[in-house]
Image (tube, grey):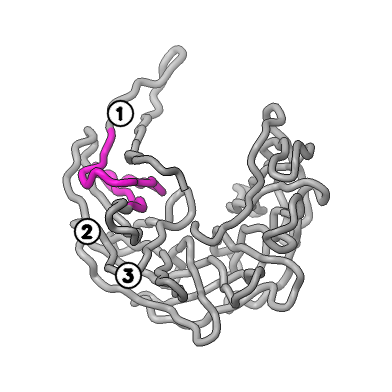
Amino acid sequence: MIKKNLALILFILFSVCSMSQEPIYFNNIYNPENTYASGRGILQIEDSYFGIFGTYEYSNYWYKLAVFKMSSSGNLIDWNLIGEENHDYWAGSIGGTLISTNDGNLAFATHVSDAVYAHSVLIKLTLELDTLWKREYHSELTSPRTWKVTQTTDGGYIMVGIDYPGGTYYDGLLLKADSMGIEQWRQIFGVGTIYSEYLTNVIETPDGGYLIGGMRKETEYLDHTLDAMVIKTDSLGNQQWTKYYGNPNVDDDMALVAIADDGNYLVATVYGDNIMSNMYREGRIWIMKIDNNGNIIEENKYGPSTISNQIKNMRKL
């Protein structure tokens, strides 16, 4: 953790046709609480922007979440702090777990922890940032933790994250809820393997199933065993296939998944080129197109190979 105050900095860029550059319409710093702030995502709904970030005050150790609304000109309209004493509210994956729902509201997935236990949470808000409902997802023997949510065609929600049984291993978590956030089912991936599986994003596929992006690693203590991972499931989360992509001898990164225009799938990650030390490796951006069985149709690596810190611990994402 960086031991200094950080402000939430938002740069909003609008694409316009110009000779060589895009104008910056506003460039502001937002942190009315004057606390540590870690931005996680922003989205536009009509002429307003909505965002989410994690925050805490050094005199109060417990992490909270903040959601905000601002105008198209960058003026802060509303601000809502979400959390409670003796619990940490985690802000989810970078890229933002905050979504616009199909009924014109907002929702986000998070997980809440105390000193010994964690559980998943889904919260739905109005565009005025008032809470419509909050759902909690517990387990008697493990600690489920959700990082990201996507709305499904039936009006429900599909969430991904990890299920932590204790020790040094993590299992992948896929959790489905209905339109009111009531859990319908959950699936756990990787139970009993020598790997930790992390699920970081999910999309619904045209056949009603799900395509999941994530990564696996051979325990959190072994260096350079991290590979991009993609899982395809049916409509109930039953695994149909799993593929691992990347350099088997160098850390890669998590997989981000999307549907391609031709009905195949796109996977973005980092390809690990060279080991620099036990903590660092060089890598390039890697984008693949895969078919419905996970086979690579085409691929490209972009940019020079740059040094990056090995992902050591996803526990507090």
Residue 124, how many percent across, how many down? 30, 67
Q: Is residue 148 above or below residue 70?
A: below
Residue behind mark 2 = 129
Cα distance, mark 1 to mark 3? 35 Å
Q: Is residue 186 above or below residue 51?
A: below
> SS at mark 3?
loop
What kind of residue is marked 2? Leu
Cα distance, mark 3 to mark 2? 23 Å
Which residue is situated farthest in the right direction here?
249
In the rendered image, is residue 46 in sight?
yes
Residue 282, how many percent across, how many down? 72, 35
Q: Name the residue located 64 percent from the left edge and 73 percent from the top edge.
A: 167
Give residue 199's quadrant in the image.
bottom right
Which residue is situated farthest in the front direction here?
59
Residue behind mark 1 = 27
**Residue nearest the viewer, comparing 284 with 302:** 284
Dot in front, 1 or 3: 3
Mark 1 or mark 3: which comes first in sequence? 1
Would residue 304 be counted in the magenta stretch? no
Mark 3 or mark 2: which comes first in sequence? 3
Would residue 54 be counted in the magenta stretch? yes
The residue stretch that appears in magenta: 29-55
Q: Are marks 1 and 3 in contact (CB under 8 Å)?
A: no
Q: Name the residue located 38 percent from the left edge and 77 percent from the top edge.
A: 136
> SS at mark 1?
strand
In the rendered image, is residue 233 in sight?
no
Q: Is residue 145 left or right of residue 42?
A: right
Give residue 155's quadrant in the image.
bottom left
Residue behind mark 3 = 86
Badge 3 density bin: few <14, some 14–19, many ≥20, Cα 10 Å: few
Q: Name the residue located 24 percent from the left edge and 70 percent from the top edge.
A: 132
